[in-house]
Amino acid sequence: MLTSMRYDLVIFDNDGVLVDSEPISNRHLAACLTELGHPTSYEDSIRDYMGSAMHRIHELVLERTGQRLPDDFDDVFHARVFAAFERELQPVAGVAGVLEKLAADRVPYCVASSGSHARIRVGHRAAGLDRWFADERIFSSEDVGRGKPAPDLFLYAAERMGVAPQRCVVVEDSPLGVQAAVAAGMDVYGFTAMTPPTRLNEATQLFADMGQLLDLLI
């Protein structure tokens, strides 16, 4: 058992931490933006948008080009991504074992994602993780209005779970998510499977294999 847990709540990011969705999502985001006249490579999308709520994508495109994305952009993008999730999405290697152990030892945990509730749910069902996440464990940037790097989402999740921020740890794989956790006054473990360690250097600690996470929590 995790009898000496250092934290009272483990907050997971979703994309890239629970589900291996970042390659799928960023491939389709780059394609959608390019089709609209905003040439974007897969590498550009990872660098600029990974971990972003949809509103931040709109804001960055407007800031850089002076042009607004179409009103139906989110719907078109999500339709493509959700269909791809159903065909391709897998859980992050090793995360099922982590969730199984946390649940067995009654360690409080939740997910706090920049993605919409619909995106989280579709991804969890496709990857077979939905059995570990009842509604009361799922928090989205939709719930707070401002996505990462603002701390609002993590603070909201902690409040709803009844845990003080300083007793929480966040598991993140994006620079925006790490910044949000730091701003919330929480420890954060940076998962470097897809992100260069230098981009997560504000994290409390870095790890490259999900199998290492349980050892970090005690």
Image (cartoon, rainbow, N blue to C red):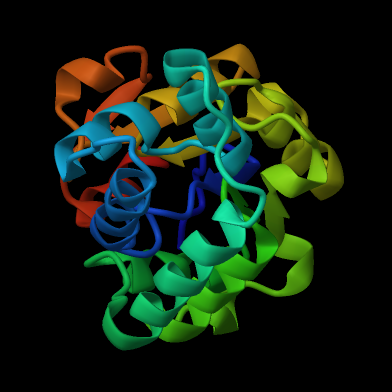
- Quadrant in the rendering for residue 197: top left
Q: Is residue 171 above or below residue 74?
A: above
x, y (%) of residue 29? 36, 51
- Quadrant in the rendering for residue 65: top left
Q: Left or right? Give the position of 152 relative to 127.
A: right
Residue located 42% across and 15% down the image: 64
Q: Left or right? Give the position of 193 relative to 29.
A: left
Q: Is residue 34 above or below residue 56?
A: below
Q: Nearer the viewer, residue 63 or 55?
A: 63
Q: Is residue 205 above or below residue 128?
A: above
Number of marks drawn? 0
Q: Quadrant of the N terminus?
A: bottom left
Q: Is residue 105 visible?
A: no
Q: Is residue 150 visible?
A: yes
Residue located 63% across and 44% down the image: 9
x, y (%) of residue 186? 58, 22
Q: Nearer the viewer, residue 61 or 35?
A: 35
x, y (%) of residue 190? 32, 32
Residue located 71% across and 74% down the image: 134
